[in-house]
Image: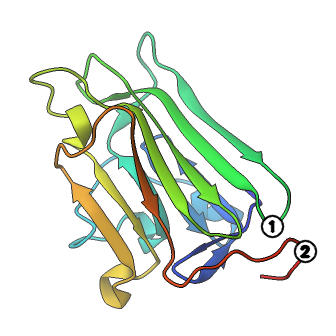
Amino acid sequence: MSRTRISVTGQLYSLLCVSSNGALYFVTANDACDGLLDFANTDLSAVAPPNDAAAVMPFWSDLTFEVTGAGSVYYQTVGTAGSRKMIVQWNNAYPQSSRNPVTFQAILSEGTNSIVFQYKTVGLGPGNPASNGGQATIGVRNAGALTNQQQIAWSFAAPVLSDSMALLFTLKGARRRPPGTKC
């Protein structure tokens, strides 16, 4: 969980659940992360993710770290208050039934409220259905997004990613707050 404050479509959050399945969920209480079952990604334009939470999904899919050669999920906060960056990296995560891993990260920027998805390796070889995001959901959403339409469902089960690719999401009308000002 992070203490960096970030806005998702205008709502400020300071708690974050990191899923091994390539998603981040913004929550208001620590226990909201308990028992989160999110291995079955969905089309965000039709079905809400578990608990209908605000979420950042750089590569939401059924991933595992329980195979030989798998890595882990790493996170780090860098910078000073007001302009920190929360970096979460899924390093050598294996999509189910894949012999090759993916490595990607989400970078959440406090102050500007921008979100960057960076993909180091997502090309898994010919014939691999998970290659290039072919079995993943990619997007950003606020809680209740099916009703309030506050989401970007960038892709679902479509091989639209490539190695060394980056996606930038920004909040419409977002502006950088000077250090030391209140959110």
Q: Is residue 167 above or below residue 76?
A: below
Residue depicted at 24% across the width and 57% down the height = 155
- Residue lying at the far bottom in this picture: please name it: 148
Quickly name the residue at label 1: 82
Percent position (x, y) of residue 92?
45, 23
101 horizontally vs 6: left or right: left
Front-lying residue, 112 or 137: 112
77 horizontally vs 65: left or right: right
Look at label 1 and name its amino acid: Gly
Residue depicted at 22% across the width and 63% down the height = 43
Look at label 2 and name its amino acid: Gly
Q: Residues within 10 Å of mark 1 (few under 14, many from 20)?
A: many
Residue depicted at 37% across the width and 89% down the height = 148
Front-lying residue, 83 or 53: 83
Percent position (x, y) of residue 166?
41, 46
Q: Mark on residue 178?
A: none
- Residue lying at the far right in this picture: please name it: 180
State the image quarter where residue 175 is shown.
bottom right
Percent position (x, y) of residue 65?
46, 25
Q: CA distance from mark 2 to mark 1?
A: 7 Å
33 horizontally vs 182: left or right: left
State the image quarter where residue 61 is shown.
top left
Name the secondary structure under disc 2.
Answer: loop
First reached walking from the N terminus: tag 2 or tag 1: 1
Q: Is residue 160 above or below residue 155?
A: above
Q: Is residue 55 above or below residue 64?
A: below
Front-lying residue, 67 or 167: 167
